[in-house]
Amino acid sequence: MPAAPNASLYNLVVSPERSQLPDGVQDRLLVEAVRRRQSEAALSDCFARWGYQEVIPPSFEYYENLAVGAGSALQQSMYRFFDRRGRTLALRADFTPQVARLAATKLFDQPMPLRCFYVGSLFRYEEPQAGRTCEFTQAGVELIGADTPAADAEIVALAIAALETLQLDDFQINLGQMAFFQTLTEGLPLAALDPIREAVDQKNGARLIEALDRAGLSGRGYDLLRGLPDLVGGAEVLDEASSLSSQLPQAARAGAALERLAQVYELLRRYGAANRVILDLSEVRGMDYYTGITMRGVAHGLGWPLVSGGRYDDLIAQFGRPMAAVGFGLGIERALLVQKHRTAPSPAAHVLVHCCDHPGCLAMVQRLRQAGCRVETDVLDTGEASLAGHARRRGVPRTLRCSGAAWLLADGSGERTLSEAALLEEAKAWPSNL
């Protein structure tokens, strides 16, 4: 008579936390997991075809490294903890400082420019909302060692190519110029600058006037900043901004920033990508380290940007070696929320095999797997009669049984007897038609 089960195992009080997750993180299951992994693979392939090579930085580092260039809001959102020596560590909240560290300390002797890409998780404390979680996946690129319009344009064009790779249609890139805004606001203390930048980016006219008045601005600079949220459109935006800034004391630097943006826009025309781009001189939100172009990719129906990026020529110098750089990051989960084709191949196996004692049975299973097929074996030994029902419940479209000299393959059209060669030939098509 079998021993009675240990009753104490059934009387345990399980803490509710053992079956729940903290706010802001999610399990990715089955088809959803397949969609995300396929998106990651597609983006990696896209970046590689543009000449970018992958880097894989660690998930956590010393806090002071990850905080380089980060504004106060991002620093406050970082998950921080201590190691056994009392040193402050943090989960990465942004890939760019990590790539900057790599470029300055480990890749500086490589031929320039460096083209790097990454795919991985970032961690930021966020109030949970649709499209915003505390752990999210970002794919991105950094082009280091080139301060040219061509480098800027390549990054913008690659961001567009990446979104198209994910089969997104209804999106646009808002392209701005942080250098222009910085020229208009030079000399302002941070306490005055932050409200102006926030009001400009939000296109909030009333708050912008209030912030400009508090900062004590007047004259042409006041008028230009007040009108900045309206400088949105095509190439005509640059002509208008150039005219408005021509009488400023800093007109030469403002004009140079606008000319740089005009050159980038012209290169995007040659890429055939300008139709995806809106010039927006109020595009001033983002990381505090941006020094040139800034961009934000937005999609209809999504309240958060899909892509953000820009030029950050001063960041890498904080790790010891001055290098120009430009890049972007793309939120994969956000992109999947608006992806045109939401279906993904089933994660189910291509075939369920009833394994017998015949020596060639498991050998055939291995050959099918080597041919690229997903193969499950009936480890529950459900028996030949129950095999079809078991496959159906698991979403597997075929069953396979060994008859010694041949193979019995069953699918929606019935059961057929196949030779080993015929089975392997037919199996070639399974990975592509499921």
Image (tube, rainbow, N blue to C red):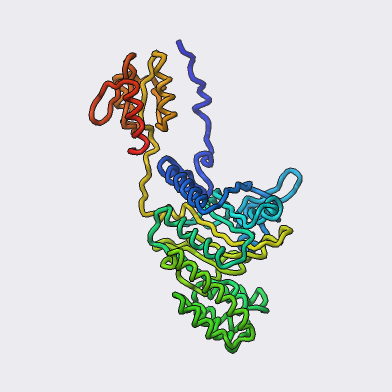
Give the side of residue 284 with respect to residue 81, left or right.
Answer: left
Who's the residue at 51% across and 63% down the image?
156
Q: Can residue 324 be seen in this snapshot?
A: yes
Residue 353: x %, y % from top left: 36, 23
List the single residue furthest toward the top: 1
**Up-down relation of residue 381 to residue 57 (above or below):** above
Residue 312: x %, y % from top left: 62, 64
Who's the residue at 49% across and 20% down the image?
5
Who's the residue at 31% across and 24% down the image?
422
List the single residue furthest toward the left: 413
| Observer-nearest of 327 and 228 | 327
Q: In which quarter of the image is the C terminus?
A: top left
| Observer-nearest of 178 and 1 | 178
Residue 200: x %, y % from top left: 53, 75
Q: In which quarter of the image is the N terminus?
A: top left
Residue 274: x %, y % from top left: 44, 67
| Observer-nearest of 123 and 259 | 259
